[in-house]
Amino acid sequence: MATAAQTATTQRSVRTTLWILLTVYIFNFIDRQIVNILAEPIALDLGLSDTQIGLMTGLAFALFYTLLGLPIARYSDRATTNRPRLIAIALATWSAMTALCGLAQNFYQLLLARIGVGVGEAGCTPPAHSLISDIVPPERRSSALAFYSLGIPIGTLLGMMIGGFLADWVGWRMAFLFVGLPGVAMALVVHFMLREPRLGMAGASDSSAAPAPELSLWVSVRTVMQSRAFVLLLLAGSTASFLAYGKTTWTTIFFQRTHELTPGEVGFWFGVINGAAGILGTWLGGYLADRFGARNRRHVLTAPAIAMAVAAPIAFLAYQASTWQAALALLIVPTLCNSLYYGPTYSAAQGLVPLRARAIAAAVLLFFQNLIGLGLGPLFFGMLSDLLQPAYGEESVRFVLYGAAFLGLIPAFFFWRCSLRLQEELDQKG
């Protein structure tokens, strides 16, 4: 039986791990999202079309991120894998490639550098989710994964603010160098500060107990996809991600083209509003999931379903606003509502799969969220903008965002459908 001192030490260790992983995820999203605020000056400098902007900001990154995510997740699920070391290597890789984006002299060089960022970031979240799920009890898992997911709005906020400021001050090339290089130093912190809990668990386990069987990659994927609730969760998360990434990229450009703000102004004002609302929404999503999910586990997903339906008409009004100040104010509620799903989604996914398939579950979610969301969202919206430009000129982005606002009803429907099956399937898993 653990003493009070041992319990306190364990809690401090868990908190330290969560804070370090949050910091890593913030770096992840700074490096991933800074390209959005820099897209317009890059396009003007290199002569890019809206379709090329969508390809650079989305598909180039997402394709390799998703393809490598599954085998890396399978490697993470092996009992012998040191997950902190894997995360440190990934962090160093994507940070170095972000810095290289600033040296690109044409579209294809920039595309290759962005592919490198995607390769590195593929080794971050699946092992991080698996690590968190091992050290945090199930009843606190939504809050813990929501805490880790705060890296999304915080990293997006910092990426926009820092990127916009640097773009106005020293140009887009130096902006990439400034944000990329600190991540290499942070990788050393991860390597020396984090410990792999499996090592201690292995030493403390009963030697007579049979080890959990190792699952092959495709057996793991097949096992995960046998859950109907997980498939519905996949559809909900993927469509939500498609809209989130597409709207984030093109809303920053919308404020520059339609409301004539500079990258620095957009980075500050949209970054603050988007980031603050996203932080509050992400935390609130985890809190509501743990509180109401304790009564009935279907309610883990109730808040995201309701919130996304509420967000749709308010987002439409924001894109209709005649001033940028009114548009920003109206976007607060939709941004908050659309951020509620992070913690509940990843927590539900971890509970729907066997222990040795947790990283695979995270990777499958990320595969579809990033291939469909990050890969196709910005690209699809960019292609639509190009198609609408002959009729609407600089206002084409506004009309694309009108449609994107009401598409938010689709993930709301899938979250609701998944919630109806969640209690039953989680009970089956124990």
Image: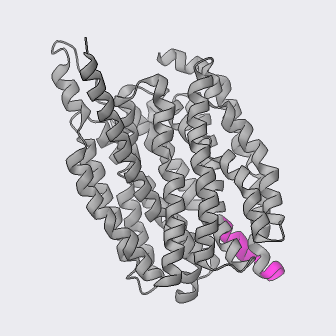
Near-viewer residue (235 or 422): 422
Place of residue 116 in the rendered image (x, y in percent of width and height, measured from the top left): 37, 67
Residue 387, visible in the rendered structure? yes
Q: Which residues are magenta?
A: 381-393
Place of residue 141 in the rendered image (x, y in percent of width and height, measured from the top left): 47, 30
Place of residue 428 in the rendered image (x, y in percent of width and height, measured from the top left): 51, 15
Q: Which image quadrant is residue 160 in?
A: bottom right
Near-viewer residue (273 or 125): 273
Magenta segment main secondary structure: helix
Residue sitting at x 65%, y 65%: 380
Residue sitting at x 74%, y 76%: 259
Residue most extreme to the front? 5
Residue 392 forms part of the magenta stretch: yes
Give the side of residue 125 with respect to residue 194, left or right. Answer: right
Residue sitting at x 40%, y 33%: 358
Place of residue 262 in the rendered image (x, y in percent of width and height, measured from the top left): 63, 80
